[in-house]
Amino acid sequence: MKFGKEFASQMVPEWQAAYMDYACLKILLKQIQHWKQKTTQPDTPPRLPRALTLYRAFSGLIQKGSGKYETTFLTAAEEVGEYEQQFFRRLDNELNKVDKFYRSKAKEVMEEAHTLSKQTNAFFAFRIKVDKVAAKFDHIHPSPRMVAMNVFNGEVQSNDSIEDHEKHISVGTKKSKCETLTET
């Protein structure tokens, strides 16, 4: 499979606008190759075939104060072909587009991580408060809900203590019913 098709198949659909325009850059490279072939002199002695390269035409990327990348050329602009200049301008624009998108997504992720961190800290603070309040009332007979919470939290009680607690609750319930009957 050719790179262009593989590249297109791997794109995240909702981020497609943020990807480099590979097809356009490839067209510009073909135009450069065509222009180079057209401008070569036919009476030059034949040489070993060499791949068309532009590595001597530019020195690299420089990040300007605006945060954008721009290609700088080693040779004078007149010596570099129009197609090469157009290609590198387009390449710079595509690189800046991807860089801007990446930075925005990284910023979103950092903000979300910060929000989740704050929520987690609030949850732990609340949990500590609940545990402190529960510790104050441990000497009182725990409610069935507290028994369930203790079991859930890993504080497993013996079956005897749970049965004693259930008996205490059922006896207390019967007493209150009997008391209301005798009062009437």
Image: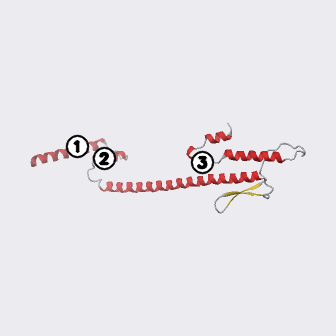
Q: Secondary structure at mark 2?
A: helix
Cα–Cα gap, marks 3 and 1? 69 Å
Amino acid, disc 1: Lys
From the viewer's side, name the closer residue of 20 and 36.
36
Q: Point out residue 184 in the picture as x, y percentages from the top left corner.
A: 9, 48
Whichever of callouts 2 and 1 sits on the residue coming sooner in the sequence is 2
Identify the residue position indicated by label 1 in the image. 167
In the picture, the disc for residue 128 is: none
* Circles 2 and 1 in contact, beta carbons < 8 Å: no
Q: Is residue 79 left or right of residue 15?
A: right
Within-10-Å neighbours for mark 3: few <14, some 14–19, many 20+ = few
Disc 2 marks which residue? 147
* Distance from Cα at disc 2 to Cα at disc 1: 14 Å
* Relative depth, front residue between 102 and 122: 102
Q: Which mark is residue 17?
A: 3
Where's residue 173, x and y in %? 19, 45
> Front-most of 13 and 154?
13
Choose top left, top right, bottom left or bottom right for residue 122. Answer: bottom left
Q: Residue at x 36, y 57 (%)?
A: 129
**In the image, what residue type sits under mark 3?**
Ala
